[in-house]
Amino acid sequence: METYPIVETFHSIQGEGYWMGQNSFFIRLGGCDVGCWFCDTKESWPAHKHPQYSVPALAEKVLAASASTVIVTGGEPLMHDLNPLTKGLKSLCSLPLHLETSGAHPFSGTFDWVTFSPKRFKLPHPSIRDRADELKVVIANAEDLQWAQDQASLVKESAIKFLQPEWNSPEATDLVFEFVLAHPDWRISLQTHKFLGVR
């Protein structure tokens, strides 16, 4: 039976991006080789440190919550073959499945929504480009704004584009604010769960 390294599962709201504020159940997979210095879940990086869960065991946790959506996040989820996970969750839970990924590995799984958050530390795999419903780029400095525009040119035209200032950086917030005012095709994403003091 297929199993996955699980850092944590929890029931909360989606704090960022297009679905901000939605009642969601999160499945955080272990394993990441992207290495972002600003990552707030570095404990997820080593996959071998986290317990393995079967898909039915994860589905049981989902069903015990009163969530409207399941969000698969990481770490970097696409380090794993997500086809068994999404097939199993779809059949057992019948809830919309969302993916949060840097796109650094080949795409797998069947999702209702894909949040693509590319990082300069490890270039995205081309298979993500037509899958992204939402492009969300973390901004720490002015160079990141150019990176965001470069990535926007590679995804499908219908993808909704967000800039998210690096947490606790007033400079990044100012950069994003001014950029969005000058570029109306972009939106601001904030980590509202941190303002609320929830996961």
Image: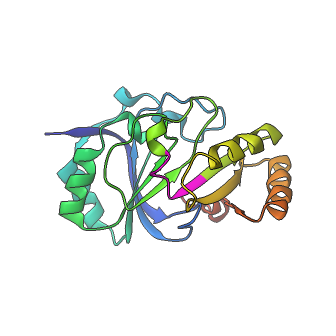
Is residue 164 a member of the stretch shown in magenta?
no
Which region of the structure is painted magenta? 129-135
- Which of the 4 quarters of the picture holds residue 142? top right
Q: Is residue 186 left or right of residue 34?
A: right
Q: Tell me which residue sits at (69%, 45%) in the image.
A: 148
Q: Tell me which residue sits at (25%, 68%) in the image.
A: 94
Q: Nearer the viewer, residue 110 or 150?
A: 150
For residue 190, above or below residue 72: below
For residue 131, above or below residue 147: below
Q: Is residue 58 left or right of residue 195?
A: left
Percent x, y of residue 53: 24, 43
For residue 114, above or below residue 41: below
Q: Nearer the viewer, residue 86 or 186?
A: 186
Residue 61 at least partly seen: yes
Q: Nearer the viewer, residue 133 or 100?
A: 133
Percent x, y of residue 166: 72, 46
